[in-house]
Image (cartoon, grey):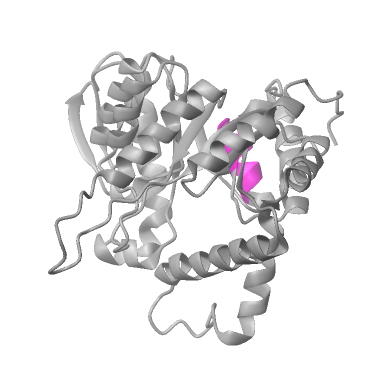
Amino acid sequence: MRFGLFGSAQARRPAPGAELTDSSQGFREWIENNVEAEALGFHSTFVVEHHFTGFGQVSASLNLLTWLGARTTTLRLGTAVLVLPWHNPVLLAEQAATLDLLSGGRLDFGIGKGYRYNEFAGFCVAMEEAEPRFEEAMAVITRAFVSDTPFSHHGRYWQYDNIIVEPPTAQRPHPPFWMGAGSERSVRQVAERGYNLLLGQYDLADDVLRHVAQFRRDSEARGRAWDPMSAGVARAVHFTDTPEELEAAYVRRFQGHLRINKLAERPGDQRERFARHDEAEVRRLCDETAIFGTPDQIAEKIEALRQGGVEYVLINFGGSIANIRRFAREIMPAFAQPAPALAAQ
């Protein structure tokens, strides 16, 4: 198996009237954690993009990855994901190509449509436009990466005349495209596009195994040789040594999930997604998708994923360098050897 990192960094805004705070500290710690993770044998890092949270999530992920690329030599640099409806696709293609070129071809270009209401509202973009904006942006970006001669584009949202995107990418014809999915239909669409698959850290293990198996079938049916590294599964991992520590970790995950997903709610949403009667189900989902516990418990859950056909896991350690080091020392050696051959299901 191979392991990567998944998640975000935080640049905290100084509180009014408080002493001056170094807002860069969280970003710099994230960089140092990733530099050490490369030395410990991690294969990649995937960083999210979010805006207008008030608690300092990464908003300019390509900038952050460019800084990290200058500090590393082998670590794959992934976006999970760039939300295309908010970006000028040509400018995004230029920035991504620059990162890919300078890093020696280490960019994994993860893209998505977005889901948080507050972000679309902040950009004054209607959520109903997310899909057509995504499709048009992806068409422009793909053409920008592969075209060595000028082209023009006159679409619904963007227009360009006689342009050629520079610089060229190091990976040809372009960096690998990664796209998230969470249903049979969306997994099929990723396979049809020929992209790589990202599965989220709140997907239940049974769903993960089912989606990976389907992605393999759908990819092979289209003549694509199966590469287990084309399906990345995000998981939250945290070491705990006592039942009290485990319960505290579950509570923190649950509370963080509620806080972040509140940003996705539309005003007046009658579904009351996180109303009191739903909280027990949300807590169950958070607990069951977390890989928390002792080293033996963590290894057992990862082994279950491997036995189900998962060979690439992207881990959210919650910014803990101690967890990164402990995972490399106590878990990774057991998964260094290839798993027994598993037939496509």
In magenta segment, residue 188: yes
In-image side of 232 versus 268 (left or right): right
Q: Main secondary structure of the magenta part?
A: helix
Q: Quadrant of the C terminus?
A: top right
Query: For the point 44% across and 65% down, which residue is it?
Result: 260
Report if residue 147 is visible in the image.
no
Image spot of residue 315 (x, y percent): 58, 41
In-image side of 205 versus 141 (left or right): right
Residue 62 occupies which quadrant of the picture? Answer: top left
In magenta segment, residue 67: no
Report if residue 74 is visible in the image.
yes
Q: Quadrant of the N terminus?
A: top right
Query: For the point 26% across and 48% down, which residue is it?
Result: 157
Between 222 and 10, the one lying in front of the other is 10
Residue 55 occupies which quadrant of the picture? Answer: bottom left
Query: For the point 52% across and 37% down, which residue is it?
Result: 5
Image spot of residue 88 (x, y percent): 25, 42
In-image side of 55 versus 160 (left or right): right
Query: For the point 31% across and 36% down, which residue is it?
Result: 64
Q: How many numbered discs sit on the rendered protein?
A: 0
Image spot of residue 307 (x, y percent): 83, 36
Q: Which residues are magenta?
A: 186-198
